[in-house]
Image (spheres, helix red, strand yellow):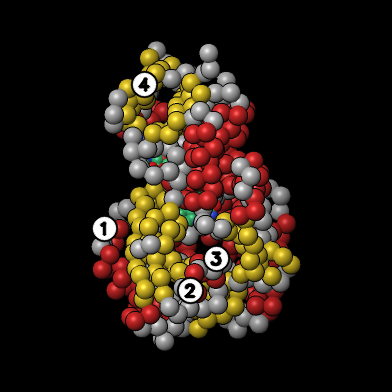
Amino acid sequence: MKKEIAILGAGPMGLACAFYAIKKGYKVTIFEAAPFAGGMAAHFDFNGLSIEKYYHFMCKSDFDTFQLLDELKISKKLKWRNTSMGYYIDGDLYKWGDPFSLLFFKKFNFLSKIRYGINAFLTGKRKNFDSLEGISAEEWLKKWIGEEAYALTWEKIMHYKFYEYAPKISASWIATRMKRVANSRKSIFQEELGYLEGGSKTLIDAMVIWIKKNGGEIKLAEAVTKIEIFQGTAKGLLTSEKSYDFDQIISTIPTPYLKDILKEAPTDMIIEYSQIENIGVVCVIYKLRKSLSPHFWLNINDSRFEIPGIIEFSNLRKMDNDEKIIYLPFYMPLSNPKFQKDKDFFFRETFAYLKIINPDISEEDILDFSINKLKYAQPICDVDFKKRIPEIKTRINNLYIADTCFYYPEDRGISESTKLAKEIVQNIIK
Ligand SMILES: Cc1cc2nc3c(=O)[nH]c(=O)nc-3n(C[C@H](O)[C@H](O)[C@H](O)COP(=O)(O)OP(=O)(O)OC[C@H]3O[C@@H](n4cnc5c(N)ncnc54)[C@H](O)[C@@H]3O)c2cc1C
């Protein structure tokens, strides 16, 4: 008889686990709390336009996504585009992210330019960041680029992404993230990013179809409420609908949810997961008639803004009728009162931002506006985080647990979730 595996979560990791487990001969059932698959990479209906709730792009190093696209026979959907980055500092827009922009950047003195350039170059070339464990990003960056350059470029970005956690964010996490984007280039002078025709839904849908066609089951809108453990072995699940028996259980849901589901596990095990903190995001999205800037990614350092950056998504993926899609992410701890604010609040705040950057934009240029909220959008990977990542194969027999922080120092990403899913199925489960 085929071994039966239950997978918690139909995000990219859960779906990829199912894909590789079915290929290996397992019988698979996925349980997903939401009424749709895709997790953080899911789309929503933006008044007739199916688009990512949260902006998604690909980098040249996303090899595991490329392999998956190939296995699903949808590689042709992957497109690349020349993109650029900008920096909006105190009312002025600067080009950013290539050697010429750095050379002509008026806000840095000559020494800062050299230091910044060397750090960016060496980080892009570095194979391994283990020696940065134990050091904060702030300390590491200040050492390389200097206090002044840090204050001008990184300080606000770190603050509006991590708030009180900012000073403790790990250097190896930041360095790995810098490397991923820095190496997604056509040449040293030209950044190149990727997207899927039809958005990340193209990949999610292809996995869903493949899984169902090959005997897997996906139970949507059926949240797992408890993992049943008997004498140190995971035996089954309780969901919002009923209870099930399984031979193996793989959880890919954000670890903060585990404390409610793992009530029968030893307390110290639950504490390990509870110690992994996350921040949430309120991601504002506009459909506009007018463009904001020529850049895909605009970093922000301006006292009038409370966001780390703006993503003009249509500068990567062209939209029908040349409509412009802009994302403005407000990352924040859930304790921040702003997280509870409504759509009108975010409209007032962000429309003011758009007008500051492009004063020609008026209310008539807004074709649509929406917000999407996520409680656990980004794990806090602070100093010495590596030491605190629990084993994927837990001490409960037949129970395997991972989420996006288990591939630290890599940042959360579709490719990284896919890679870990493959690793779990091929090397970790028995
Ligand atoms: C703002 C933002 C921008 C991003 N940009 C990019 C990008 O440009 N490129 C990129 O590659 N990645 C990007 N990502 C990250 C990418 O979306 C994630 O790395 C990826 O979706 C993680 O997949 P996952 O399956 O590991 O987790 P998730 O996507 O979080 O999936 C977990 C699933 O578990 C489900 N779940 C929760 N509780 C339960 C329960 N009790 N029972 C059953 N199911 C449950 C959730 O509903 C969810 O569907 C971005 C993410 C965000 C938030």
Q: Amino acid at mark 2?
A: Asn
Identify whether 321 is placed above or below 224: below
- According to the picture, the residue beneath numbered tag 3 turns out to be 317
**Comes first in the chain, label 1 or label 2:** 2
Q: Amino acid at mark 4?
A: Tyr
Image point (36%, 76%), residue name: 366
Image point (35%, 43%), residue name: 35
Q: Residues within 10 Å of mark 2 (few under 14, many from 20)?
A: few
Q: Residues within 10 Å of mark 4 (few under 14, many from 20)?
A: few
Q: Nearer the viewer, mark 1 or mark 2?
A: 2
Frontmost residue, 382 versus 226: 226
Residue 359 can be seen in this image: yes
Q: Amino acid at mark 3?
A: Arg
Q: Is residue 429 left or right of residue 100?
A: left
Q: CA distance from mark 4 to mark 1?
A: 36 Å
In contact (CB < 8 Å): disc 3 and disc 1: no
- According to the picture, the residue beneath numbered tag 2 turns out to be 321
Identify whether 86 is placed above or below 62: below
SS for callout 4: strand
- According to the picture, the residue beneath numbered tag 4 turns out to be 244
Q: Is mark 3 within 8 Å of ligand 1?
A: no
Image point (32%, 53%), residue name: 334
Q: Is residue 191 left or right of residue 134?
A: right
- According to the picture, the residue beneath numbered tag 1 turns out to be 340
Q: CA distance from mark 4 to mark 3?
A: 43 Å
Residue 259 pos. (x, y %)? 34, 33
Residue 339 pos. (x, y %)? 30, 58
Q: Is residue 121 left or right of residue 14?
A: right
Frontmost residue, 91 versus 245: 245
Q: Is mark 1 within 8 Å of ligand 1?
A: no
Q: CA distance from mark 3 to mark 2?
A: 12 Å
Q: CA distance from mark 3 to mark 1?
A: 31 Å
